[in-house]
Image: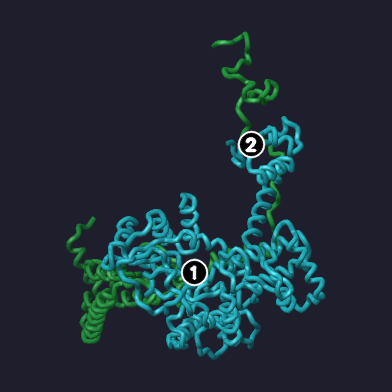
Amino acid sequence: MTVQQTRLCGLLLREHFGEVVEKVGTHLLRSGAQNLRTIVQETNLSVDLVKKCLCVLVQHGACLFTAGRKGPGSPTEYRACCDRILRVLRYPRYIYTAKTLYGDTGELIIEELLQRGHMTMSSTVKTVADRLTQNMEEGHSLDYNKVSSTFSKLVETHFLQRCPPVGAAGTSGSAAPAEAPATPAAPAAAVSTALPTPESFPDCYTVPQVTLVGRGKRQLVPEDGEDQRNAKRAKMTSETHGDEGIYWQVNFERFHQHFRDQAIISAVANKLDQTSSEIVRTILRMSEVTTSPTATCTKPLSANEIFRSLPASYNIPRQILDQYLTLLVDDPMEFVGKSGESGGGMFVVNLHRALANLARATLESIVQERFGSRSARIFRLLLRKRHLEQKQVEDFAMIPAKEAKDMLYSLLSHNLVQLQ
Amino acid sequence: MAGKGRGVAAFSFNIEALGIGRGSMPEARVGPSPLYPNTDFKPVPLKVGEDEDYMLALKQEMRGTMQRLPHNIKVQSNRAEVEKYTERYLKQSQMEDEGWTPDWNLFPKELKPRTKKPRTKGTKNKKTVKVSSKEAVDVLSKLDVLAKNDDGNAEKSDDEGEKKTGNEDEEIEEEEYEEEDLEEDNDYIESYFDNGEDFAADSDENMDGEATY
């Protein structure tokens, strides 16, 4: 964790949660895992304030707590996660993605969950319905069912996941998939540092049975203090909906997967044409929930399945689809690969290779924009051939000696190439 | 300086061994390098479009909303005893969203706020309530007898009550505030209470003691 990263996290915490939380958060980031008393002593804040700050940080997933290192009796230790705080920078992008995929309802659901950390399904649905009703015309209100169905769709496509229950915070992640979430923590002797991911619990993506009947309520403009007091009394009567204790959070990894897929699709559209990008989009969509985030390539899909799942607006005949697939496989960027012949050909999207190629193209374009196309030529040469002598550089790049030297030295001074 | 005047461009090492000829040296520098060197290639313009505008608007909106949520913990500054005019009207609109209690099943138990405080606050409440009710009875029974001290105390405790319900300060500050009031000297209250007869009587007494000029 670098100094600049810590500083950025501090600024983000201050913007969104206030200066007190910033103080506690930066202290945790700098000092690693600490227990409550040490934090109170070293930040010179009152115990109540520190407790509140830690609650806020845990609520948003920015801080994790584990049992102490010295055994079961020692106080709980808190550790802040720099990565999680840096995700705050991407919140607008997540919300906008949800809007493009699921409309205004999806956008508001994601926004509410991002602002509050984690919430139950019923409270999310109610808040979102109220907010949408506010913006509708007089006399109209939004039914809870519509919001619930959007919520379920978000869960099915894994954009939302359940928060992992706390009791199993001591078990190692690899053993968890077979266990039910209710098993007690592993023997205290093995205090493993690997916390289970939310995906290691089998109920991660099941929508609970929730009884939610009603419509969104429009918030009246308060005429005087009387209305406010009445509204407050009505809110005090809390209703239970059958999903107490089940909290949902936004699944950032799934959003990142979606961004990665978008990057690949737009690269294919730029390099080839719209139809090939639609084919790649179809393949990626079919394998979005079956592919793990770190997989090298997607699960193989047969050409028959791809043909059946193409969007209705693209009614291309079967031979054209086959030709497109062959074209994609032969492309030097290697986006799509062929892994077998059954079912008309089994095709995969090579995720790692596609991303590596995209990264290389980005670097080359940076050098081109900064130093000119001839320096970019030298840079590309060096990327392909790894080690070259000065003379070889001049020969392969077909650039006169003096200019080649100048360009090489300017690249060297910017640390883009290295001498050996 | 060896070589000065005779071979000005003599180097201390063998140039040919490095592969650099004499003629390929960069020009000698005159003076310090410029503060802003020229760039031949200007940077590519920033990506703008309606997507980016929408995301920027989302970001500003989110910053504003999150500062108003109860997650945003503000330092409790020592507020002046006189409430600011704006604060009174702002508070009424924010009264709904003030509290946020996390689900303690998911949080470590030690982060729960202590429950001792409400009890002490309750006893203090009863004390002041008793005091004010007692003094209200005194006032009713002693209406004809103008006891300055008791009346002053009743008014003072009424003020206190109002300020407590309207004020949402932390409990610590409230308790301090109450204590301050109860411990105040009674001299101040005497002159605060304005009763015609007593004023005249007081002023007569004082004038007896003071020297006339």
Against A176, residue B15 (above or below) is above
Residues marked 2 and 1 touching at CB (< 8 Å): no
Secondary element type, mark 1:
helix
Horizontal and vertical percent position of residue A407? 69, 36
Against B136, residue A398 (above or below) is above
Horizontal and vertical percent position of residue A120? 48, 80
Horizontal and vertical percent position of residue A173? 43, 69
Of residue A287 and residue A263, the one placed in the foreground of this image is A287
Name the colour assigned to chain A in the rendering: cyan
Instruction: Find disc 1 in the rendering and name its residue.
Output: B68
- Residue placed farthest to the front in the image? A341
What residue do we see at 69% from left, 62% from top? A335
Label 2 to label 1: alpha-carbon separation: 44 Å
Against B4, residue A64 (above or below) is below
Q: Earlier in the sequence, mark 2 or mark 1?
A: 2
Of residue A49 and residue B203, the one placed in the foreground of this image is A49
Is A279 displayed left or right of B131 in the figure?
right
The tag on residue B33 is none
Location of residue B79 by image quarter: bottom left
Disc 1 sits on a residue from what chain? B
Secondary element type, mark 2:
loop
Is A359 displayed left or right of B127 in the figure?
right
Q: How many residues crowd mark 2 within 10 Å: few (<14), some (14–19), many (20+)? A: few
Instruction: Find disc 2 in the rendering and name its residue.
Output: B36
Disc 2 sits on a residue from what chain? B
What residue do we see at 48% from left, 80% from top? A203
